Amino acid sequence: MNLNALDLNLIKVFDALLRERSVTRAGEQIGLSQPAVSAALNRLRHLLNDQLFVRRGNDMMPTPRAESMAEPLRVALREIERVFHSAKAFDPAELERTFTFMGADFFSMMLMPALAARIAGAAPRASLRFLDSARGDVSRLLQEDEIDVALERPLEVSDWVSSTPLFHSPFAIIAAHDNAAIRQAGIMEGKTLPIDLFCELPHILRSIDGSMSGSTDEALRKIGRTRRVSLTLPHFQAVALAVANGNHLSAVPRQFAVWAAETLPLVIFEPPLPIAVPEIRMYWHARHDDEPPHRWVRDQVLEAVGVLGFVESGVAENVGAWRGARTDQPAV
């Protein structure tokens, strides 16, 4: 192949097609029209003597040749970006890039609106995407640059994945404000639910994979007790709505419980037993450790978490200390 015929923009088109599997979406990601992306793909096919992408249903699927080129070209693109970024001071106001986050709906509701506002104020041409944590394996998605950042509980990840703690997420118990059994027992909001009542009432479990057991069940087993999980739902918002309209209990992150009780007829109680408190972490690929735009966005996450009051003592006392390098299992 004649390298003189190779345009760097062709590599960007190739990378966008690998990510999006769509000519239209690839164009939207890199700011090109659909005809321009199609023309670039045709040039690549001619240069490489390979179809590279073939249509399958509504998707453009990579050929084996394209798949073999994917990771080396991504590494090359990132290295080129790093060289150019290091050549001049980073200015968020000039940033034109889409950053993709992945996590539970907890974050899409409670963090992303505030984060979007922060980033829009400093980097008005940057965009954010948020994917549900059910999307898949974090390491693979980071490796393929499908996502920039994952917000998750501690995960078993590859050694090339960097991470930093965000906050701890202790559990609280939510119930409908007119829950008859709780009213009859005369338990005031904010108090600890009796263990017998806690085990007798039906529970709703937030579970991505439909598992009927979570952290609360593990804690109960340690004291020889069980509860009845009568419903699992994949999203915290759905859990809160179901609890507000029934006689169920649910153990949810305390930050979410307070947030949900502001808009739904819910009351909050302390759990009757210790439940392991999960640490929430931010994950990204180590190749982005020192990349100025990526590092800046990670800083925005850390600062937004602190402003929103998620931070628990001892977890996020010093945002500056985290700058630089640094699942979904059933929640409860």
Image (spheres, grey):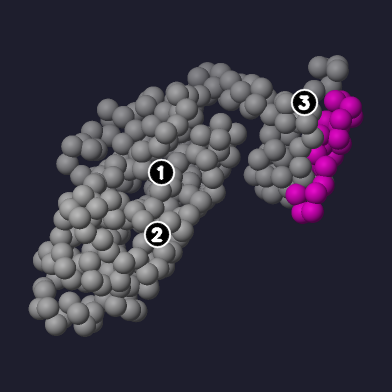
Question: What kind of residue is marked 1?
Answer: Leu
Sequence order check, earlier mark of 1 and 2: 1
Task: Give the position of the N terminus as an image quadrant.
Answer: top right
Q: Which of 150/126 is in front?
A: 150
Q: Residue at x 76, y 42 (%)?
A: 61
Residue 44 belongs to the span the image colors magenta: yes
User: What numbered label is drawn on residue 212?
Assistant: 2
Sequence order check, earlier mark of 1 and 3: 3
Question: What kind of residue is marked 3?
Answer: Asp
Task: Give the crowd class for mark 1: few <14, some 14-19, many >=20 residues within 10 Å.
Answer: many
Q: Residue 182: where, in percent of width, then height?
A: 17, 77
Q: Secondary structure at mark 1?
A: strand
Q: Nearer the viewer, mark 1 or mark 2?
A: 2
Query: Given contact means CB atoms under 8 Å apart, are the residues at marks 1 and 2 in contact?
Result: no
Q: CA distance from mark 1 to mark 2?
A: 23 Å
Residue 227 in sight here: yes
Q: Residue 25: where, in percent of width, then height?
A: 69, 49
Q: Which of 17/204 is in front?
A: 204
Q: CA distance from mark 1 to mark 3?
A: 36 Å
Asked if residue 87 lies left or right of residue 186, the reply is right
Please tell me whether residue 263 is drawn above or below residue 291 in the rendered image: below
Q: Secondary structure at mark 2?
A: loop
Q: Nearer the viewer, mark 3 or mark 2?
A: 2
Query: Given contact means CB atoms under 8 Å apart, are the residues at marks 3 and 2 in contact?
Result: no
Q: Residue at x 65, y 26 (%)?
A: 71
Please tell me whether residue 181 is drawn above or below residue 298 in the rendered image: below
Say which residue label 3 marks: 7
Say which residue label 1 marks: 151
Which span is picked out in magenta?
36-59
Q: Residue 180: where, in percent of width, then height?
A: 21, 83
